[in-house]
């Protein structure tokens, strides 16, 4: 996440748009960085555009210039968060690996991403509370399903052809298992620790859980 720019809110700017002395891409990225934290911490209803403006040393008017309104800002935050993990998945180079190692690498990638991006997990949880109301309004987000499954489907095809994996495995089921494990570990960290006295994000347990995820997925793929 980019560093927040300290200082007071700048003076009012001309009505025709943001200050041209600022880098528009940097300004937009800074707004998204702060908005991501605000929405992840407070939800869509609880976050305030005034607070986001104050923490980016910009103005509410400038945020609306870039994003239109609060809902469009929130959708932009969701789009960037989901596009981040989907891009990493799509660019994953596993063609040189055998199917078993390729599945392990894909599962480990998701594990590492969700652990290092807790705001993403919180945003997903919040959007589920809102019944995916905002995701459904984004053509970007609804178009990310196929790329998310293409890499996985190719790995499974190679595994079936080589006789390593079952013939009746659904790529979406495998995606669900990987996502469920990785989201649960971060989203339920505090309640799980309060009840069972075990912090699932304890660094001492990281290798254990990372290996467990891979073993669970491969067990499903290879059981006869």
Image: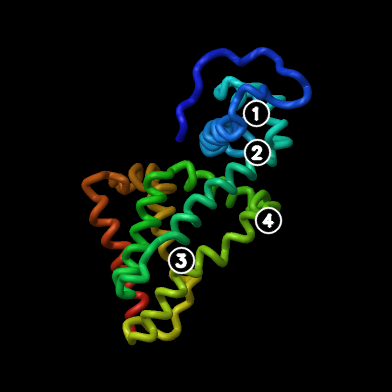
Q: Where is residue 184 in the image (x, y as percent from the top left)?
A: 42, 53
Mark 1, residue position: 49
Of labels 1 and 2, the one closer to you: 2
How far, Cα to Cα, is label 1 from label 2? 9 Å
Q: Which of marks 3 and 1 is nearer the N terminus?
A: 1
How far, Cα to Cα, is label 3 from label 4? 21 Å
Q: Earlier in the sequence, mark 2 or mark 3?
A: 2
Mark 4, residue position: 139
Within-10-Å neighbours for mark 1: few <14, some 14–19, many 20+: some
Q: Do the residues labelled 3 and 1 touch (CB within 8 Å)?
A: no
Q: Are marks 1 and 2 in contact (CB under 8 Å)?
A: yes
Mark yes or no: residue 38 visible: no
Residue at 28 percent across and 46 percent down: it is 198
How far, Cα to Cα, is label 4 from label 2? 15 Å
Q: Is residue 73 above or below residue 223?
A: above
Mark 2, residue position: 73
| Secondary-structure class at tag 4 | helix
Of labels 1 and 4, the one closer to you: 4
Q: Nearer the viewer, residue 150 or 171?
A: 150
How far, Cα to Cα, is label 3 from label 1? 35 Å
| Secondary-structure class at tag 3 | helix
Within-10-Å neighbours for mark 2: few <14, some 14–19, many 20+: many
């Amino acid at each position: 996440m980019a560093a927040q720019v300290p200082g007071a809110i700048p003076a009012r700017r001309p009505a025709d748009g943001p200050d041209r002395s600022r880098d528009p891409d940097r300004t937009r990225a800074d707004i998204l960085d702060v908005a991501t934290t605000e929405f992840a911490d407070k939800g869509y209803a609880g976050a305030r555009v005034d607070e986001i403006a104050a923490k980016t040393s910009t103005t509410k008017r400038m945020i609306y210039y870039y994003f239109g309104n609060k809902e469009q800002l929130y959708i932009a935050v969701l789009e960037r968060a989901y596009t981040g993990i989907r891009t990493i998945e799509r660019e994953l180079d596993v063609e040189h690996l055998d199917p078993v190692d390729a599945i392990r690498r894909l599962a480990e990638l998701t594990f590492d991403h969700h652990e290092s991006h807790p705001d993403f997990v919180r945003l997903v949880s919040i959007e589920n509370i809102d019944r995916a109301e905002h995701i459904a309004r984004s053509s970007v987000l609804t178009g990310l399903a196929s790329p998310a499954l293409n890499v996985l489907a190719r790995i499974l095809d190679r595994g079936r052809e080589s006789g390593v994996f079952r013939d009746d495995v659904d790529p979406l089921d495998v995606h669900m298992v990987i996502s469920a494990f990785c989201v649960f570990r971060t989203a339920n960290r505090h309640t799980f620790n309060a009840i069972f006295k075990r912090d699932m994000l304890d660094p001492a347990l990281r290798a254990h859980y990372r290996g467990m995820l891979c073993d669970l997925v491969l067990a499903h793929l290879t059981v006869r």
